[in-house]
């Protein structure tokens, strides 16, 4: 393959997160469409991806390339990294949960820059929160490159690898915590006498509007205080939540998810 036709970037794994990244990259014009490839081993999914991204090369094997994003199951990562490097990749960005930089670098060998990342599912609507950690051979330019990839689908922060498990416990698992809150609030609205359709619509807009207020930069405690008049309805509800140690429950949930991430990394 000539350099003119060599893929600048290959996304290996065409699942939800891989597809979200490709969609974001195309929308942001981060990568030339003709130099972008998606690798997906399942034929039915390849057909779906070709329909979603008709201008992108979708294939079942890694083509000759310059850089690769690894979005496959953790157990498959070492073999995929080794294959990508054999196909010319000199940069590897992994979004596989629990796969350490040491494991990635052992598979990649010398002279390959490795960056490990943890994105979350809101990346599918380009509202993701991702963290990246540099491998031992990753330069500032490599980190800027990784940031540009994930920045196409949301916010990117840099952390030490030792903090990535905490990122997983907070931001990676966090959407599920909020969806559980949404479920509980809808049920609470029904219990208070609302129809489920009305409760559902109210809760969806409640969370969307509250997120917009948070995005304005004010502190959560200040926003909460603004809604909580002394002796009012909100104060009564907050007192019940505090009495049930909801704050502590969230802290414990993040701690448990963080520890589980460490266990998966060790295994």
Image (cartoon, rainbow, N blue to C red):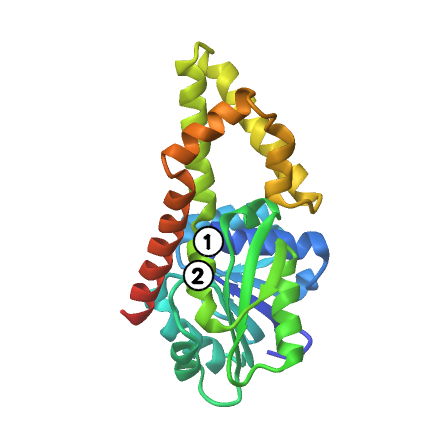
Q: Which mark is residue 215?
A: none
Where 262 sits versus 153, above or below?
A: below
Residue in view at x 54 percent, y 24 percent: 234
Query: Which percent across, then down, holds residue 58?
Result: 53, 58
Count of marks overlaid on the render: 2
Residue in view at x 48 percent, y 23 percent: 236
Where 137 sits versus 20, above or below?
A: below
Query: Which percent across, then down, holds residue 120?
Result: 50, 52
Can residue 114 be seen in the rendering of this structure?
Answer: yes
Classify 10 Å Cα crowding around label 2: few (below 14), some (14-19), many (20 and above).
many
Instruction: Please identify the quadrant where the C terminus is shown.
Output: bottom left
Q: Is residue 256 left or right of residue 64?
A: left
Instruction: Please identify the quadrant where the N terminus is shown.
Output: bottom right
Name the outermost residue toward the bottom: 110
- 135 or 192: nearer the viewer: 192
Residue in view at x 47 percent, y 59 percent: 167
Q: Are marks 1 and 2 in contact (CB under 8 Å)?
A: yes
Query: Which percent across, then down, holds residue 108?
Result: 45, 82
Query: Which percent across, then down, holds residue 183?
Result: 42, 29
Where 28 sits versus 138, above or below?
A: above
Q: Which mark is residue 170?
A: 1
- 260 or 90: nearer the viewer: 260
Residues at marks 1 and 2, CA–CA distance in whole angstroms: 6 Å
- 202 or 237: nearer the viewer: 237
SS for dot 2: helix
Q: Is residue 90 left or right of residue 173?
A: right
SS for dot 1: helix
Q: Which mark is residue 166?
A: 2
């Amino acid at each position: 393959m000539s350099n003119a036709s060599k893929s600048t970037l290959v996304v290996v794994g065409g699942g939800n997160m891989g597809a979200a990244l490709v969609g974001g990259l195309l929308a942001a014009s981060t990568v030339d469409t003709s130099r972008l490839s998606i690798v997906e081993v399942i034929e039915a999914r390849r057909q779906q991806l070709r329909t979603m991204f008709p201008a992108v090369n979708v294939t079942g094997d890694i083509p000759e390339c310059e850089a690769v994003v690894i979005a496959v199951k953790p157990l498959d990562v070492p073999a995929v990294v080794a294959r990508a490097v054999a196909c010319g990749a000199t940069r590897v960005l992994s979004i596989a949960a629990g796969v350490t930089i040491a494991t990635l670098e052992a598979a990649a060998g010398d002279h390959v820059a490795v960056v490990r990342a943890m994105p979350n599912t809101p990346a599918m609507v380009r509202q993701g929160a991702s963290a990246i950690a540099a491998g031992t051979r990753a330069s500032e330019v490599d980190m800027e490159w990784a940031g540009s990839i994930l920045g196409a689908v949301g916010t990117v922060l840099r952390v030490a690898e030792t903090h990535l498990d905490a990122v997983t416990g907070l931001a990676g698992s966090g959407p599920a915590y909020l969806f559980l809150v949404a479920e509980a609030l809808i049920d609470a609205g029904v219990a208070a006498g609302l129809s489920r359709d009305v409760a559902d619509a109210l809760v969806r807009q409640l969370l969307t509007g509250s997120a917009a207020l948070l995005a304005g930069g004010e502190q959560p405690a200040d926003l909460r205080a603004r809604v909580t008049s002394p002796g009012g309805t909100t104060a009564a509800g907050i007192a019940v939540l505090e009495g049930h140690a909801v704050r502590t429950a969230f802290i414990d949930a993040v701690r448990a998810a963080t520890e589980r991430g460490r266990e998966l990394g060790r295994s």
